[in-house]
Image (cartoon, helix red, strand yellow):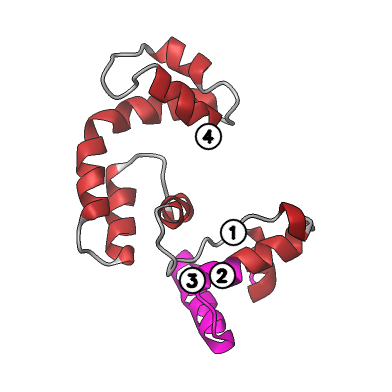
């Protein structure tokens, strides 16, 4: 959030910020140099991404379009982004989900379907089961847990 606020303060979407300055603005993030390039490449595509988000497409269709439009974003990052937008029917296949599904490898979409079936069998949304599993495997205290 600190980086997003910094980008807002610099008016990233309306001003031309040079690559070197952008690296400084996102300095706390991992892989800041390629991410700075991705941000610059994504900037002109942002209006299209906003249209995708506000469209009547399914969450899977939105994810597919976001992956297509934004370089550097795959299924996991796109699912995470959409989760932050309130979409709860996509799984974020991470280490904790792979442990739960007892799968070190595997196709993302197949693992997601498996996770959806598990969630449904417990009467949960995939987002709620994911959050619970993350909390369980991370060892975070309930007081500090934010869903």
Mark 1–mark 3 Cα distance, whole angstroms, equals 19 Å
Mark 2–mark 4 Cα distance, whole angstroms, equals 22 Å
Q: Residue 26 vs residue 144: left or right?
A: left
Please identify, in this view, whether the residue under mark 2 or under mark 3 is nearer the observer. 2
Which residue is tagged 1? 147
Q: Residue 29 vs residue 17: left or right?
A: right
The image position of residue 86, as x and y in percent, is 41, 58
Mark 1–mark 2 Cα distance, whole angstroms, equals 8 Å
- Picture quadrant where residue 97 is located: bottom right
Task: Classify 27 as above or below 64.
Answer: above
Q: Residue 52 vs residue 30: left or right?
A: left
Which residue is tagged 3? 112
- Picture quadrant where residue 131 is located: bottom right
Q: Nearer the viewer, residue 107 or 95?
A: 95
The image position of residue 144, as x and y in percent, is 73, 52
Residue 89 badge: none
Which residue is tagged 4? 1
What secondary structure is marked by label 2? helix
Identified at 45% across, 11% down, the residue is 20
Please identify, in this view, whether the residue under mark 1 or under mark 3 is nearer the observer. 1
Which mark sits nearer the N-terminus, 2 or 3? 3
Which residue is tagged 2? 128
Please identify the quadrant where the C terminus is shown.
bottom right
Identified at 54% across, 85% down, the residue is 123
The stretch drawn in magenta includes residue 83 = no
Please identify, in this view, whether the residue under mark 3 or under mark 4 is nearer the observer. 4
């Amino acid at each position: 959030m600190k980086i997003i606020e910094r980008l807002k303060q610099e008016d990233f979407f309306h001003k031309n910020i040079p690559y070197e300055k952008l690296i400084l603005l996102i300095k706390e993030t991992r892989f800041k140099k390629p991410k700075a390039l991705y941000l610059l490449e994504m900037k002109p595509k942002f209006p299209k991404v906003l249209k995708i988000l506000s469209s009547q497409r399914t969450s899977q269709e939105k994810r597919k379009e976001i992956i297509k439009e934004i370089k550097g974003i795959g299924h996991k990052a796109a699912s995470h982004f959409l989760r932050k937008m309130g979409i709860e029917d996509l799984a974020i296949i991470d280490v904790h989900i792979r442990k739960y599904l007892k799968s070190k490898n595997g196709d993302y979409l197949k693992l997601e379907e498996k996770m959806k079936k598990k969630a449904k069998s417990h009467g949960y949304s995939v987002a709620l089961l994911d959050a619970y599993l993350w909390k369980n495997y991370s060892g975070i205290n309930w007081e500090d847990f934010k869903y």
